Image (tube, rainbow, N blue to C red):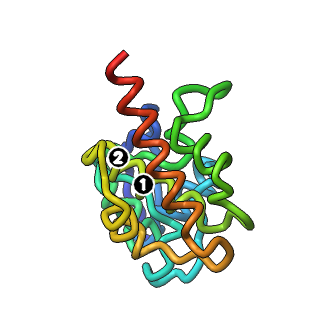
Amino acid sequence: MTDTRKITVTVNGKSHTKEVPTRLLLSDFLRHELLLTGTHVGCEHGVCGACTVLIDGRSARSCLTLAVQANGHEVMTVEGIAPNADELHHLQQAMQDHHGLQCGYCTPGILTTLFELLRDNPDPSEHEVRSAISGNLCRCTGYQGIVEAALDAAQKMRAGARS
């Protein structure tokens, strides 16, 4: 017999109430229950960062978090970054412009990590960007395009805030 709990979690601004097994990982809840497949699962040990989401605005590894732990909290996945379905966030556009994504497997975790960084630090240095993404493994890009994208997005976000 599987122990279950009823949870209510707000994901990307929308409230969801579901009965879930107590041992269900948040990554599996997002991908299989809510069909939000942008959150990727790589290592399943919290090492690679592909599953990074924001819980109450802070980075968390969804492969190490149980869905029941998200009960009553707000979760933002990579799908929640864009302002709407027809428009990319500055960070997403910059990743495209600076070739900061190649195979794309690490991209959702990197985007959510950088989203948090730029929200908290609108004018990061290159070192601060590199430090922020140090827990996100990327096998394809060499990170330079990602760093350039983050710095460009920060500049555009600051310029947009001034206008």
Number of labels in the image equals: 2
Q: Are marks 2 and 1 in contact (CB under 8 Å)?
A: yes
Is label 2 in a helix, a strand or a loop?
helix
Q: CA distance from mark 2 to mark 1?
A: 6 Å
Which image quadrant is residue 143 in? bottom right
Return the residue nearer the eye: 105 or 8: 105
| Callout 2 amino acid | Leu
* For residue 57, side relative to residue 83 (left or right): left
Q: Residue furthest top?
A: 163
| Callout 1 amino acid | Leu
* For residue 37, side relative to residue 156 (left or right): right
Question: Residue 118: which numbered mark, if any?
Answer: 2
Residue 19 percent across, percent down from the top left = 46, 52
Quadrant for the C terminus, please. Answer: top left
Return the residue nearer the eye: 99 or 70: 99
Q: Which residue is at a point 46% across and 84% down the rendered structure image?
A: 45
